[in-house]
Image (cartoon, helix red, strand yellow):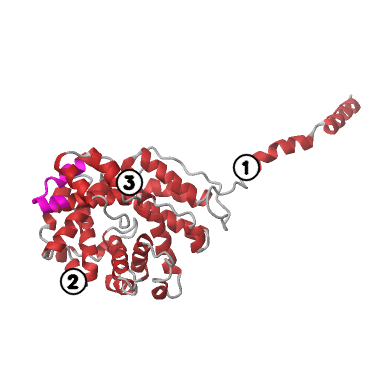
Amino acid sequence: MAFLLYIAGVWAVATTPWTAAVAASAPAASSTTSTAPSAGPSPIAAPSSTAPTVPAVWTLSTLRNYLVAETNAKDPGVALADLQRITLKDPYVDGFCHPVAHEIGHAALARYQGNFAKAVSFLNDVCGSGYLHGVVEDKLQQEPDPATAVTTLCSPAQSASCIHGIGHGAMFVSHLDVAAAERMCDRFPESGQVVSCSEGIFMQLFEPDEGDPTALAKLPADKLAAEPQYPCAEQPAIDRSACYFYAPIYFLQTHDYTAHPAAFVQALDWCLKAPTSDARDGCSQGTGSRLMKYNIDRPVWTAAQCEQAASARQRSDCVWGMANYWNVNYGSRSAARTRLCPQLSGDAARLCRISAPGSSSAD
């Protein structure tokens, strides 16, 4: 009996098609380890095999964690395409997707070991070109001579969006020293380039990336109480408009706009305390921009807030800010005219048509 069992075992081993079984399992293994990136160059670092988990509700943190994990596991192009899909499906995400796009840029530059050309080859303007801003600000910090790199990193195109990213980077390099960052932006030869760079400075100051509260610490409550829109009045003339434009961000944060929507109309009233008409215009436009950014899924409600402004001029400024941000978010100067204005009615629709097209470079 033992001899017969031995013979049967040898026969089973000899006749089993081991090669076929291994071959049949090989494609499944290789499909998880050799998948080519969907866009752009092949990564230098080996991608992670950990698939990100889709949360029930998107928040800034869950969206950032999901897309950074996807960038590491696949490539930035996949993450940016997913970000675009998510914002179209859930428009409320537009209210916080710009800093998330920054984080994808940071992760991409790390993935490609500081190779700027590889990282920007995945360029996507979703969420106000936040991805480009993130790549640029991180790369500027890595440069041995950031002051020189300020005017060369975005060459040869020198697009306004890329230079805006330089402004963000200048704030990181200068450790949130506004005056030092402004001196870096002043190296650009054209005034329009200086302004674009300045926009990045003040966006970073008033709306720091999550986990970086030091920027808000630069704005002491006592000085804000004594001087509206601090520190804008003290800025050089060429940088002042950007400061006033982004100043409402701080007001809205400190008045908990998510729980108290009336804060948007209060911000418009607050803008009237600015010392000059240009400053009041810039602040009102910035409030309109934030209104649209934080409520892009309800443009009619947003326009109704602008219509509560104290004067016709301020209402016009507010709607201009709305149209401007709509163009920025969707990466087109015609987006507001074709997609936003037709949703509005009455005076808001008229002002929207006058305002569009606005800028498409400053978030």
Whether 191 is drawn above or below 348: the answer is below
Which residue is at a point 49% across and 47% down the rendered structure image? Answer: 78
The residue lying furthest to the right in this view is 3
Question: Residue tagged by mark 1?
Answer: 31
Q: Are marks 2 and 1 in contact (CB under 8 Å)?
A: no
Say if residue 262 shows up in the picture: no
User: At numbered mark 1, what does the secondary structure look like: helix, strand or loop?
Assistant: helix
**Magenta segment includes 302:** yes
Q: Position of residue 11 (x, y in %)?
A: 87, 29
> Seen in the image, is 58 located left or right of residue 237?
right
Residue 272, compared with residue 25, is above or below; it is below
Residue type (three-letter) at the residue carrying disc 2 = Glu
Whether 306 is among the magenta residues is yes
On the image, the x and y values in percent for residue 289 come to 24, 52
Three-letter code for the amino acid on which mark 1 is drawn: Ser
Question: At label 3, which amino acid type do we have?
Answer: Asp
- Expressed as whole percent of the image width and height from the top left, the position of residue 18 reads 78, 36
Task: In this rendered view, identify the residue nearer to me: 194 or 4.
Answer: 194
Question: 360 left or right of 33?
Answer: left
Residue 132 quadrant: bottom left
* Quadrant of the rendered image containing residue 182: bottom left
Q: Marks 1 and 3, how far apart in space? A: 34 Å
Image point 22% across, 57% down: which residue? Answer: 250
Which numbered tag is attached to residue 234? Answer: 2
Secondary structure, mark 2, is: helix
Q: Quadrant of the N terminus?
A: top right
| Residue toward you, 17 or 268 | 268
The mark found on residue 94 in the picture is 3
